Image: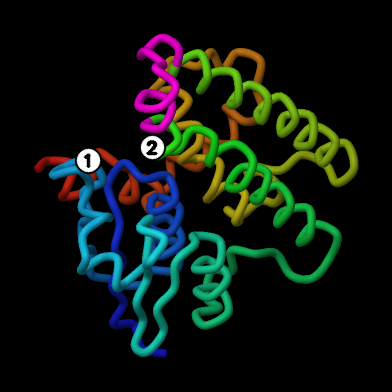
């Protein structure tokens, strides 16, 4: 496939943030197309974007004839098509642990705090802002408590490492950094998660992660 890649996303979307990190780690050039999730009722609901992704969610990655949604599928695609700077570890127990931890974040923690869930809580369940924040804190703490324990066990079994599961950034880190960004945004106390905190601090020293930060995206300024 060519490197003429287009990423449809939104600066504050955790899932789009993951894909930006992956693209940056692999040094892949791409065009960014903003899909504003709030403006005019949400541009993801437009007829034009619906044609691109009937789920009306971001991100979508277009690479030649390939058109994909779902961030983990996109990351796997990029890792297989552009094998420089591997993101998913080689086949081994660590590979499958990494994939499981990435799914813990992307499938168990993140969806419960996604924009459309929060909008539903407000619209249909009459939740005020405080109720929504309590909801967010509860599910992030549930997920991070389990993940911190898994990362502890990983280090007991395989030894200390700089990032989540190895000494190079992996799919776990790509998922973890955006989730911690959200946690901090909503005032979650991270004191109980020293490994998670250390891993994210290490990641956020890397140019690929810095360039992918929400506040560094062009549509953050609009």
Earlier sequence position, callout 1 versus callout 2: 1
Q: Which residue is mark 1?
A: 38
Q: Quadrant of residue 9?
A: bottom left
What percent of the width, then of the height, locates residue 61? 37, 70
Is 47 one of the magenta-colored residues? no
What percent of the width, then of the height, locates residue 29? 29, 72
Instruction: Residue at 54%, 18% (x, y): give it.
Output: 137
Of residue 33 and residue 26, the one placed in the foreground of this image is 33
- Tag shown at residue 119: none
- What is the secondary structure assignment of the residue under circle 2? helix
**Relative side of 76 to 55, left or right:** right
Instruction: Residue at 53%, 75% (x, y): give it.
Output: 77
Of residue 183 and residue 121, the one placed in the foreground of this image is 121
- Tag shown at residue 115: 2
Is 125 one of the magenta-colored residues? yes
Instruction: Residue at 62%, 31% (x, y): give it.
Output: 196
What percent of the width, then of the height, locates residue 119? 36, 32
């Amino acid at each position: 496939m060519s490197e003429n890649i287009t990423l449809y996303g939104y600066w504050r979307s955790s899932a789009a943030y993951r894909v930006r990190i992956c693209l940056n780690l692999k040094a892949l050039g791409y065009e960014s197309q903003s899909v504003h999730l709030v403006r005019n009722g949400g541009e993801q609901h437009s007829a034009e974007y619906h044609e691109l992704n009937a789920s009306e969610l971001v991100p979508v990655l277009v690479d030649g004839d390939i058109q994909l949604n779902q961030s983990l599928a996109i990351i796997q695609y990029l890792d297989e098509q552009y094998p420089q700077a591997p993101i998913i570890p080689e086949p081994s127990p660590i590979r499958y642990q990494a994939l499981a931890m990435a799914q813990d974040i992307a499938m168990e923690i993140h969806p419960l705090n996604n924009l459309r869930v929060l909008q539903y809580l407000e619209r249909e369940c009459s939740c005020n802002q405080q109720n929504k924040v309590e909801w967010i804190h509860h599910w992030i703490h549930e997920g991070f408590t389990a993940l911190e324990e898994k990362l502890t066990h990983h280090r007991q079994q395989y030894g200390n490492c700089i990032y989540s599961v190895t000494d190079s950034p992996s799919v776990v880190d790509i998922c973890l950094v955006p989730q911690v960004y959200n946690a901090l945004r909503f005032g979650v106390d991270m004191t109980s998660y020293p490994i998670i905190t250390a891993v994210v601090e290490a990641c956020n020293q890397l140019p690929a992660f810095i360039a992918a930060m929400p506040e560094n995206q062009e549509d953050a300024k609009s």
